[in-house]
Image (tube, rainbow, N blue to C red):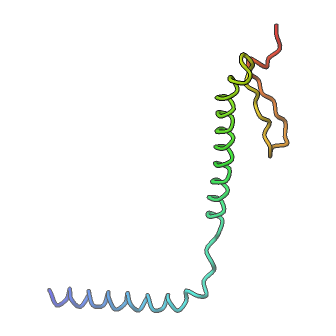
Amino acid sequence: MSTYLWRKYSEHVYSKWEKTLVWDMIDPYRRPKSFKPLVMIYVAAFYTGVIGSSITEQLYKEKYWEEEHPGEAVPLMRPKFYYGPWKVHREDHMPKQ
């Protein structure tokens, strides 16, 4: 029984090496891997940074607005790279009833 197992193991190791040799010869002719996942990660990281910086800037403005303009509402910044409709409904910007 042990002889049988050793023979099967040696055949497995030899065929594994043979497969590796064949695939190493074919590898340079394969299609390149897609860049789409990498591009998607970069785009997501960029927009995460843009949103994070706008939130940080708004919080900074709210922190120091009260010192220079006591009693006034903190203005919201209009988005720099968004040219679509932009409307904010807040209680301090709503018309008086």
Percent across and percent down for residue 61 are 69, 32
Residue lying furthest top in this view? Answer: 97
Percent across and percent down for residue 4 are 19, 88
Assign the C terminus to one quadrant of the image: top right
Residue lying furthest front in this view? Answer: 68
28 up-or-down from 82: above or below: below
In-image side of 83 versus 90 (left or right): right
Percent across and percent down for residue 67 are 68, 23
Query: Which of the 4 quarters of the picture holds residue 75?
Result: top right
Assign the N terminus to one quadrant of the image: bottom left
Q: How many marks?
A: 0
Query: Which of these two is toward me, 96 or 74?
Result: 74
In-image side of 78 versus 10 (left or right): right
77 up-or-down from 5: above or below: above
x 30%, y 90%: residue:
11
32 up-or-down from 17: above or below: above
In-image side of 7 versus 55 (left or right): left
Percent across and percent down for residue 71 are 72, 16
Query: Which of these two is toward me, 30 or 75?
Result: 75
Query: Which of these two is toward me, 79 or 22?
Result: 79
x 27%, y 90%: residue:
10
In-image side of 51 versus 76 (left or right): left
Query: Which of the 4 quarters of the picture holds residue 12?
Result: bottom left
x 61%, y 74%: residue:
33
Query: Which of the 4 quarters of the picture holds residue 59?
Result: top right
x 79%, y 20%: residue:
93
